[in-house]
Image (tube, rainbow, N blue to C red):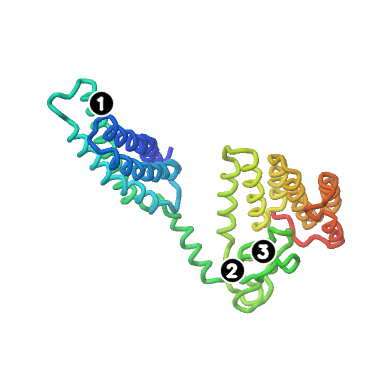
């Protein structure tokens, strides 16, 4: 296992204890130990619940060492440290010479747990602060992003077939599956997907790093446990990302899984029409027509406009399957 996960995962698990301990401590100080008045106790309890939820919110980010969550983790832990000191101070004031043994045992336990939690929170805050790079994108990705900002190639702002808005690195339109035209930013000559340099002027072209990164992220997300409808949506988003990268066969399989997980007929027909678009643009007209016929049979009201799509099957394929 990665060293950073070995350190951060125990901290993440203790953050769950920390959030619950904050609520239990204030509740005990107010209603059992009578250190706080009822009004102040209620107000503090409301605030503590908010802080505890905030602290619990960083557990997942710490567990998976999530990129881009540095500031959220620092705030979530940092806001709770001063209040942890307050809880410890209030627990000290709860001690009394004639305190019952059971009550003293409760105070002792809460005090020890809060001191341990304070130590863990300070350790976590310091570790995350020092190891900020753990929660930042890799340097290679940052450099690639800066390189893309310099725009080595430009792309039409709309798909010429369906008029959907498209972005620079996409190979195919996620809406209709059509191949998107690219042009060299230096001389304006047409360039093909996968070209490293412009054939006309020799200018170096940017690689589709961001799209491939998005594909990997959505693939991991789609495979995580969730409700069937959530997984259906995730697979549909994954299919769109695959289309942006030109992976048509994989996009078809992802749409197939999106159909499999949803129980709503209209969602199914919507995904089926999208699959038909991909079939059409990869030269499989027969499969496209069969998919549209199936969509019409499933939803005779044709909410997904499968009949309209059938009229467009006369067009030839507009995007090649990426190897």
Which quadrant is the N terminus positioned in?
top left
- Mark 1–mark 3 distance (CA, rounded to whole Å): 68 Å
Give the residue at x 80% y 55%. 305
Location of residue 140 in the rendering, given as x and y in whole percent from the top left corner: 47, 58
Residue that carries the numbered disc 1 in the rendered image = 106
Disc 3 on helix, strand or loop?
loop
Q: Are marks 2 and 1 in contact (CB under 8 Å)?
A: no
Residue that carries the numbered disc 2 in the rendered image = 205
Location of residue 239 in the rendering, given as x and y in whole percent from the top left corner: 67, 51
Q: Nearer the viewer, residue 231 or 301?
A: 301
Disc 2 on helix, strand or loop?
loop
- Mark 2–mark 3 distance (CA, rounded to whole Å): 10 Å
Residue that carries the numbered disc 3 in the rendered image = 193
> Crowding near pointer 3: few (<14 within 10 Å), some, many (20+)?
some
Give the residue at x 68% y 66%. 192
Quadrant in which residue 83 is drawn: top left
Location of residue 60 in the rendering, given as x and y in whole percent from the top left corner: 45, 42
């Amino acid at each position: 296992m990665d060293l950073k996960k070995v350190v951060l995962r125990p901290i993440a698990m203790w953050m769950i204890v920390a959030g619950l301990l904050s609520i239990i401590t204030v509740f005990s100080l107010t209603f059992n130990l009578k250190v706080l008045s009822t009004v102040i106790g209620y107000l503090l309890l409301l605030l503590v619940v908010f802080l505890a939820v905030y602290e619990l919110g960083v557990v997942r980010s710490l567990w998976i060492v999530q990129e881009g969550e540095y500031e959220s983790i620092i705030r979530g832990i940092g806001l709770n440290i001063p209040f942890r000191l307050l809880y410890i101070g209030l627990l000290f004031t709860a001690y009394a010479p004639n305190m019952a043994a059971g009550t003293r045992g409760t105070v002792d336990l809460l005090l020890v747990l809060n001191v341990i939690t304070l130590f863990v929170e300070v350790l976590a805050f310091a570790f995350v602060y020092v190891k900020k790079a753990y929660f930042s994108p890799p340097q290679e990705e940052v450099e690639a992003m800066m390189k893309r900002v310099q725009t080595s190639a430009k792309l039409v702002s709309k798909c010429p077939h369906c008029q959907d808005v498209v972005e620079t690195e996409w190979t195919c339109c996620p809406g209709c599956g059509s191949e998107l035209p690219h042009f060299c930013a230096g001389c304006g000559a047409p360039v093909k997907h996968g070209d490293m340099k412009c054939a006309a002027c020799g200018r170096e072209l940017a690689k589709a790093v961001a799209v491939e990164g998005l594909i990997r992220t959505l693939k991991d997300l789609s495979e995580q446990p969730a409700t069937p409808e959530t997984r259906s949506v995730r697979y549909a988003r994954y299919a769109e990302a695959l289309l942006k990268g030109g992976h048509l066969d994989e996009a078809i399989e992802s749409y197939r899984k999106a159909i499999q997980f949803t129980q709503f007929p209209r969602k199914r027909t919507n995904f089926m029409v999208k699959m038909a678009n991909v079939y059409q643009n990869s030269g499989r007209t027969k499969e496209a027509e069969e998919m549209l016929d199936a969509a019409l049979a499933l939803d005779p009201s044709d909410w997904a406009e499968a009949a309209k799509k059938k009229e467009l099957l006369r067009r030839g394929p507009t995007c090649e399957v990426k190897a």
